[in-house]
Amino acid sequence: MARVLDSTRLTARILGPFLAVAGAAAVLRRDDLLALIEGFQGDPALTFVTGMLLVLSGLALMAVHQRWRTPAEIALSLTIWLLTLRGAFLIFAPSVIFDLADNVIASTPLVVALGLAAVGVGVWLTLVGYRRAAG
């Protein structure tokens, strides 16, 4: 018999590990972030394609998960919306994202705090996604 996952658990299995890896990379590679961001900002094609992929993946996740009842559902839905909006800004107004990134990168403690927060949320969502179903 095929296993069917509810949309919250399925989405948590996708976004949880992603957030944990992205947060850990920001903390562990914080000295490389400035060069990475400068390279990204210097390549309009990469910026555009990344924006398109974020919008596409965000819309796909929205189609699967658009729930706002429990803390996990709220965290997932909010993350999906933020990633989708980030993609739209990269397509239509990349300077907004670039300015925000420059301001965050200027503060190492902020990079570490945001990275650790992403790791924490990512681990929590991963546990939500892979926990044993009741029953």
Image (cartoon, rainbow, N blue to C red):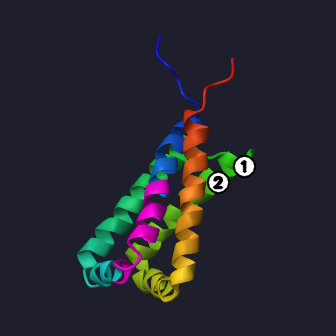
Residue at 26 percent of width and 72 percent of height: 46
The extreme right residue here reads: 69
To which residue does mark 2 refer? Answer: 75
Residue 50 image-quadrant placement: bottom left
Label 2 residue SS: helix
Residue 9, percent across and down?
57, 36
**Quick check: is 75 in the magenta stretch?**
no
Vertical order, 96 against 61 (above or below): below
- Residue drawn at the location 38% of the way across and 68% of the way down: 51
Q: Identity of the amino acid at label 2?
A: Ala
Res. 38 mark: none
Residue 121: image x %, image y %? 60, 55
Amino acid marked by disc 1 = Pro
Q: What element carries label 1?
A: helix
- Numbered range of the magenta stretch: 20-34
Residue 4 visible somewhere in the drawing: yes
Contact flag, marks 1 and 2 (Cβ < 8 Å): yes
Q: Nearer the viewer, residue 51 or 130?
A: 130
Name which quarter of the figure residue 132 lies in. top right
User: Residue at 41% of width from left, 68% of height from top?
Assistant: 28
Number of other residues with Cα within 10 Å of mark 2, as a class: few under 14, some 14 to 19, many 20 or more = some
Query: Residue at label 1?
Result: 71
